[in-house]
Image (cartoon, rainbow, N blue to C red):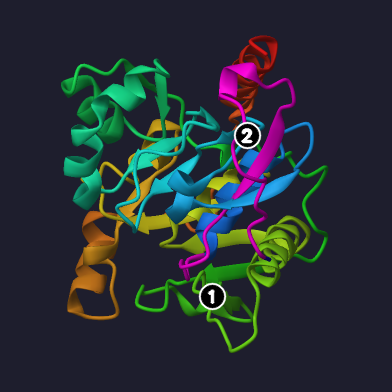
Amino acid sequence: MRVKGIGFATKRPDECDTMKFAQMVCAVSQNIGDDIQSIAAANRLPRVDLYLDREQLDAVQGPDPVLMVMNGWFMHSDRWPPSQFLRPIFVGFHVAPNKRKLIAAHAQYLRRYEPIGTRDKGTADFLNGLGIRAGVTYCLTLTLPSRPKAPANGKVIIVDAGEIKIPSTVRRNAVKLTNEFFFFPGLREATKLQYARELIEFYRDTASLIITTRLHCALPCVAMGIPVVFFGDPADYRTSIVRDIGGTIYDKRIHGKNVLGRIGQAIDPIDWSPLPLDITALKERLLQEVSTRIEAVEASR
């Protein structure tokens, strides 16, 4: 998938009448979770006219303004702030720790779009510390539709949890997957997006239980009504969202395939048969939040 150019600017953004809608792509990322976040954000748009690389948002060209939801992890490159032609919707925004200095140097840019909706409290606290009004909206992967029913003969799906001590009765006949996506020569970004869509559908139609260390396996599955056992660092602000929405973060450091794993079971017992989380109220609030922001930008035209 090549990022489509939209011409060279002949007018200022406030002089143009046509709004375009963009989906974010993450060309350099091997984490399929980035693409799952992109799909969830694009689901909220009235249409997708073009695709923009998360790492090159300063290159967006006019004359038409381009609306894009800034849901996800930012970022690998130092190409910040985005172009004047981008109309960003800041919902589910996360700042990587090593990009805080860059974001702080351009704090005025984010002030133009206050309040900033962040994916997690850590990002919100960082932005508020810069004098930028910000609040936690959580991630748009939590807005994926609930599945109508669980599969009759569902499978346990283990995603990037190979180092976790899982009882044989749970892992027997389980499906093992990874969120890592490996590129091959000639493979296009479109293939990665399509794989992400198919992965979401596979979880929805197949999973009786998800066991994972991946945030963006856990969150979309919670949204779809799938029971999830999540392993991470309970002190990590990036994954604290799991606990915030009513889930449990099992400490992966004490549940490994070693002596600590046996100790971990004793001091931090795992529920291997959890119920799905009910996040209906949160989902409705998040859907309303992003819809209101998109409508406000459209109305301003």
Q: Position of residue 120 (x, y in %)?
A: 35, 34
In the displayed structure, does residue 265 sit left or right of residue 203?
left
Q: Which residues are magenta?
A: 2-31
Q: Please, what secondary structure does the residue beneath circle 1 have?
A: loop
Q: Nearer the viewer, mark 2 or mark 1?
A: 2
Badge 2 vs badge 1, beta-carbon distance below 8 Å: no
Vertical order, 217 against 234 (above or below)? below
For the C terminus, the quadrant is top right
Q: Position of residue 242 (x, y in %)?
A: 41, 41
**Residue 226 showing in the rendered view:** no
Q: Give the residue number, with chain letter if any, for mark 1.
A: 181
- Per the picture, the main secondary structure of the magenta-coloured stretch is loop
Residue at figure coordinates x 64%, y 33% from the top left: 63
Q: Please, what secondary structure does the residue beneath circle 2 have?
A: strand
Q: Give the residue number, with chain letter if any, for mark 2.
A: 66
Vertical order, 65 against 72 (above or below)? above
Q: Nearer the viewer, residue 216 or 133?
A: 133
User: Label 2 sits on what residue type?
Assistant: Val
Q: Position of residue 115 (x, y in %)?
A: 40, 15
